[in-house]
Amino acid sequence: MQPSAAPDPVDLAHTHARPLHWLATATATAAVVALAGALTPRAAEAGPAVQKAPAAAGPAAAPDPGTAAYPLQCGGADHRVARSVTGDLDGDKNPETVAVVHCEAGSGTPPAGLYVLTPGRGDGAPARIVATLVDPREQRSVTGLAIRDGAVRATLLGYSSPDVPSCCPDEKEQVSWEWSGGAFVRTAGAEAFGA
């Protein structure tokens, strides 16, 4: 066996690190890092522009009532959105749309449906009906539509009998609907408007 040509490590002074040696090494490394940071160009002076993070998304746009598919049986006639209002009904900070829709009629007062709409799923998708507050089969007209304090408020006009002409409803009811427990709860009469 041949002896190693390398000197014995015990004989080399630099192989024995002392605390002063480590302190000097750490100081020199910190100085190099600081110098490199000072020589790097600022974002405004060179390189691609720094983009800001997108702002937090605000509330969604209210659903367009003209895009929804309403479950009306109009016998070949068109339907019409007579009026609509928007507001946050379920407390999610996004507006819903409430629309009064009826079939086009040449005369008389056609029965109306009252629908709650939310945005469609995906960009450009039509509004979706999530609740029917008044079904056209109830033979009611809807007037005075408003959203106040998160509740839908309206006046329903109707007929006491089939003998009443369709031009002249003879019943009137104040109603409101409020989102509670996962559904719209209807109140009627003086209670509906807090009287």
Image (tube, rainbow, N blue to C red):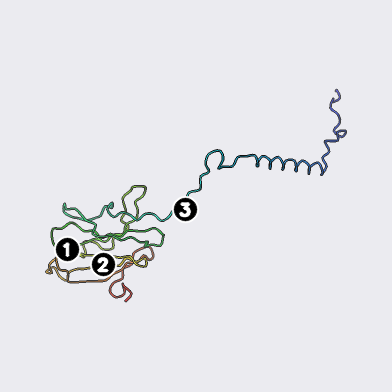
**Label 1 – label 3 distance at C-alpha:** 46 Å
Q: Are marks 1 and 3 in contact (CB under 8 Å)?
A: no
Count numbered badges in the picture.
3
Residue 55 x, y percent position in the rendering = 47, 51
Residue 72, disc = none
**Which residue is located at x 34 percent, y 47 percent?**
124
For disc 1, the marked residue is 109
For disc 2, the marked residue is 144
Badge 2: residue crowd in 10 Å (few <14, some 14–19, many ≥20): few
Task: Report the amino acid beneath label 2.
Answer: Gly
The single residue placed furthest to the right in the displayed view is: 11
Q: Secondary structure at mark 2?
A: strand
In this rendering, the label closer to the viewer, 2 or 1: 2
In this rendering, the label closer to the viewer, 1 or 3: 3
Q: Nearer the viewer, residue 176 or 47?
A: 47
**Label 2 – label 1 distance at C-alpha:** 15 Å
Task: Report the amino acid beneath label 1.
Answer: Thr
Q: Is residue 33 left or right of residue 120?
A: right
The single residue placed furthest to the front in the displayed view is: 45
Q: Earlier in the sequence, mark 2 or mark 1?
A: 1
Residue 121 x, y percent position in the rendering = 36, 50
Q: Nearer the viewer, residue 85 or 182?
A: 85
For disc 3, the marked residue is 56
Q: Earlier in the sequence, mark 2 or mark 3?
A: 3
**Which residue is located at x 21 percent, y 68 percent?**
157
- Looking at the rendered image, the quarter that the N terminus falls into is top right
Q: Are marks 2 and 1 in contact (CB under 8 Å)?
A: no
Q: Nearer the viewer, residue 181 or 95?
A: 95
In the figure, residue 70 lies in which quadrant? bottom left
**Which residue is located at x 17 percent, y 69 percent?**
169
Q: Secondary structure at mark 1?
A: loop
